Image (cartoon, rainbow, N blue to C red):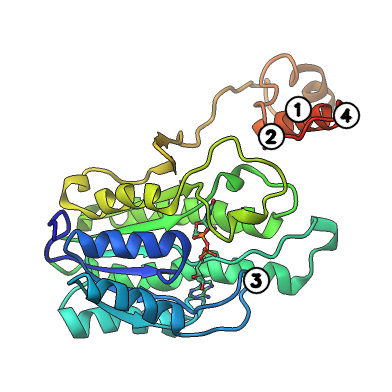
């Protein structure tokens, strides 16, 4: 057994399937004791089962590692608390939390129901808060701090039929950045991964994704961020797909204009386009390319 995470205790939500499973297995293979937290639901959050979390724990223990399964709904406050309490009661500490659990309920904004909105925000965004909140209160007091890792998506920059999912993923980026600044003085890092990988979740994307990889391609970056070698890395968003790792920029103002006193709408209409203007939105450019490709009979690339 390798030792990149020797002695560390790591909780992985969504650790029973897809990318979370690959992360749980990789962390265990590197010597971490792993809490596999998975509600074992279908892709829309239906039909919970403890089987997937148990199966990953069996895989880890058969390979000589140490793991415990927790089959709770991570969108509930008490589930986050129970998860971290289980780690602390069993192994004495919690060094890393990887929040991978997620569901999809895709719908155009004008047709989306309240339930479709609430369920996706609860699983992704609140599902990060519940476990980050519980872990942070332990990590800030323990020697060695800790590492929080969220899972966002390129969709946070805007997504056609995923207003709920994109909003949750944008919220996760802001939560991670807030955790990074709020916990900086306690030696706790917080970063986010924007993955692309072949799983049941990506299987239904209607167009071919330009870049693709496997869950096992995502896991090494997560292991690195959980390790002591990444103690200086915080507040970042990394795309991980296949053999590529890329860092996202930090949001910041890029251009400004000033009036003598308060602006009038007329002055803004006259000056905005030629000064501050707009920032190009990649998703709108891509939609335009897809529209043109479809018009010429090609299969569009996302
Ligand atoms: N696969 C991709 O290409 C891709 C792209 C962008 C972002 N992501 C993000 O990566 C993460 C993992 O995606 P995946 O493709 O492995 O998905 P997946 O559907 O294969 O796995 C998600 C896991 O989360 C679990 N889960 C769902 N709701 C839960 C809840 N309330 N409590 C506990 N567990 C719950 C499910 O049981 C499942 O095992 C998600 O956050 C997803 O949004 C994935």
| Other-residue count near label 1 (Cα within 10 Å), few / some / many at <14 / 14–19 / ≥20 | some
Secondary structure under tag 2 reads loop
**Tags 1 and 3 touching, CB below 8 Å:** no
Q: Which residue is mark 4?
A: 295
Q: Residue furthest right?
A: 295
Q: Nearer the viewer, mark 2 or mark 1?
A: 2
Q: Which residue is mark 1?
A: 289
Q: CA distance from mark 3 to mark 4?
A: 32 Å
Q: Nearer the viewer, mark 2 or mark 3?
A: 2
Going 38% across and 47% down the picture, which residue do you hit? 217
The percent coordinates of residue 78 (x first, y second) are 43, 85
The percent coordinates of residue 112 (x first, y second) are 79, 64
Q: Nearer the viewer, mark 4 or mark 1?
A: 4
Q: Which of disc 4 and disc 3 is earlier in sequence?
A: 3
Q: CA distance from mark 2 to mark 4?
A: 13 Å
Q: CA distance from mark 4 to mark 1?
A: 10 Å
Q: Which residue is mark 2?
A: 301
Q: Which of disc 3 and disc 1 is earlier in sequence?
A: 3
Answer whether residue 97 is visible to the viewer in this image: no
Q: Which mark is residue 163?
A: none
| In this view, 300 is above or below 214 | above
Q: Which of disc 4 and disc 2 is earlier in sequence?
A: 4
Q: Which of disc 1 and disc 4 is earlier in sequence?
A: 1
| In this view, 97 is above or below 54 | above
Res 1 → quadrant = bottom left
Going 25% across and 55% down the picture, which residue do you hit? 226
């Amino acid at each position: 057994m390798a030792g990149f995470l020797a002695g560390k205790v790591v909780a992985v939500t969504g650790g029973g399937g897809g990318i979370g499973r690959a992360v749980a297995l990789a962390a265990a293979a590197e010597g971490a004791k792993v809490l596999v937290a998975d509600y074992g639901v279908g892709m829309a959050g239906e039909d919970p089962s403890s089987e997937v979390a148990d199966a990953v724990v069996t895989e880890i223990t058969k390979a000589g590692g140490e793991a415990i399964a927790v089959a709770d709904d991570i969108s509930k406050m008490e589930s986050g608390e129970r998860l971290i309490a289980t780690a602390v009661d069993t192994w004495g500490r919690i060094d890393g939390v990887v929040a991978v659990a997620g569901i999809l309920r895709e719908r155009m904004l004008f047709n989306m129901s309240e339930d479709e909105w609430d369920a996706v925000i609860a699983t992704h965004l609140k599902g990060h808060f519940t476990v980050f909140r519980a872990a942070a209160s332990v990590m800030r007091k323990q020697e060695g701090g800790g590492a929080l890792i969220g899972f966002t998506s390129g969709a946070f920059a805007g997504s056609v039929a995923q207003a709920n999912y994109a909003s949750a993923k944008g919220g996760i980026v802001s939560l991670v950045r807030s955790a990074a600044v709020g916990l900086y003085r306690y030696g706790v890092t917080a970063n986010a991964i924007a993955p692309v990988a072949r799983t049941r979740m990506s299987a239904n994307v209607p167009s071919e994704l330009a870049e693709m990889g496997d869950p096992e391609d995502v896991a090494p970056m997560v292991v690195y961020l959980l390790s002591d070698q990444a103690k200086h890395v915080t507040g970042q968003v990394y795309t991980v797909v296949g053999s590529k790792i890329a860092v996202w920029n930090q949001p910041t103002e890029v251009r400004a204009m000033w009036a003598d006193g308060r602006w009038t709408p007329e002055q803004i209409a006259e000056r905005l386009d030629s000064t501050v203007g707009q920032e190009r939105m990649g998703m709108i450019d891509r939609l335009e390319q897809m529209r043109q490709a479809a018009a010429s009979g090609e299969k569009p690339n996302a």
